């Protein structure tokens, strides 16, 4: 799965946005009427967008010193005391955030 597909899944499954096709462009629309241009939403690579996801789900992000490159960043959502704990590892913080957010939404991405 490529980054654009992951970005789309995060917009739909995690943020709850819908894609609105317009004449000249497309935009992600939220429930309050706010919008983000489709081509500008890149949470899998842009930390500013990933941080919006992390804030929404209270995601903890931590670098892993000495870990293999593909596991250099750890992200966790801990929905305690009655919920589940989700974690993901990735090369970058934005990707780790997206992967753990999608896990919490019930979407597993194969490496």
Image: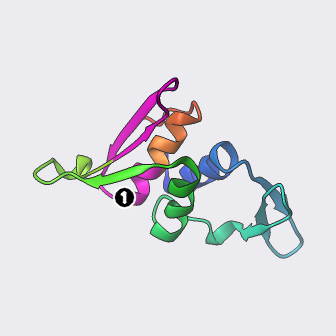
Q: Residues within 10 Å of mark 1 (few under 14, many from 20)?
A: many
In the drawing, does residue 17 fall left or right of residue 94?
A: right
How was the colour assigned to the protein in this rendering? rainbow
Which residue is most to the left? 66
In the drawing, does residue 89 fall left or right of residue 81?
A: left
**Nearest the eye: 51 or 98:** 51
Residue beneath the point at 83% across and 55% down = 31
Which residue is most to the top? 82
Residue bearing mark 1: 93
Magenta stretch, residue numbers: 75-97
Whole-percent x, y for residue 84 in the image: 48, 26
Q: Quadrant of residue 19?
A: bottom right
Which residue is most to the right? 23
Residue beneath the point at 63% across and 45% down = 14
In which quadrant will I find the C terminus?
top left
Whole-percent x, y for residue 92 in the image: 33, 58
Residue beneath the point at 61% across and 66% down = 41
Which residue is most to the bottom? 24
**Nearest the eye: 51 or 38:** 51
Secondary structure at badge 1 equals: helix
* Residue 111 visible in the picture: no
Examine the rendered structure and indicate whether residue 21 appears above or below residue 107. Answer: below
Q: Would residue 2 be counted in the magenta stretch?
A: no
Residue beneath the point at 36% across and 58% down = 93
**Nearest the eye: 87 or 6:** 87
Examine the rendered structure and indicate whether residue 9 appears above or below residue 34. Answer: above
* Residue 105 visible in the picture: yes
Whole-percent x, y for residue 63 in the image: 24, 56
Q: Quadrant of residue 49?
A: bottom right
């Amino acid at each position: 799965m490529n980054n654009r597909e992951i970005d789309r899944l995060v917009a739909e499954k995690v943020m709850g946005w819908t894609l609105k096709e317009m004449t000249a462009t497309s935009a992600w629309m939220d429930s309050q009427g706010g919008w983000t241009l489709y081509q500008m939403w890149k949470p899998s690579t842009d930390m500013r967008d990933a941080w919006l996801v992390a804030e929404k789900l209270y995601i903890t992000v931590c670098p892993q010193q000495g870990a293999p490159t593909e596991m250099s960043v750890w992200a966790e959502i801990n929905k305690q005391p009655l919920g589940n704990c989700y974690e993901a590892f990735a090369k970058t913080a934005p990707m780790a955030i997206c992967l753990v957010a999608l896990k919490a939404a019930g979407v597993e991405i194969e490496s």
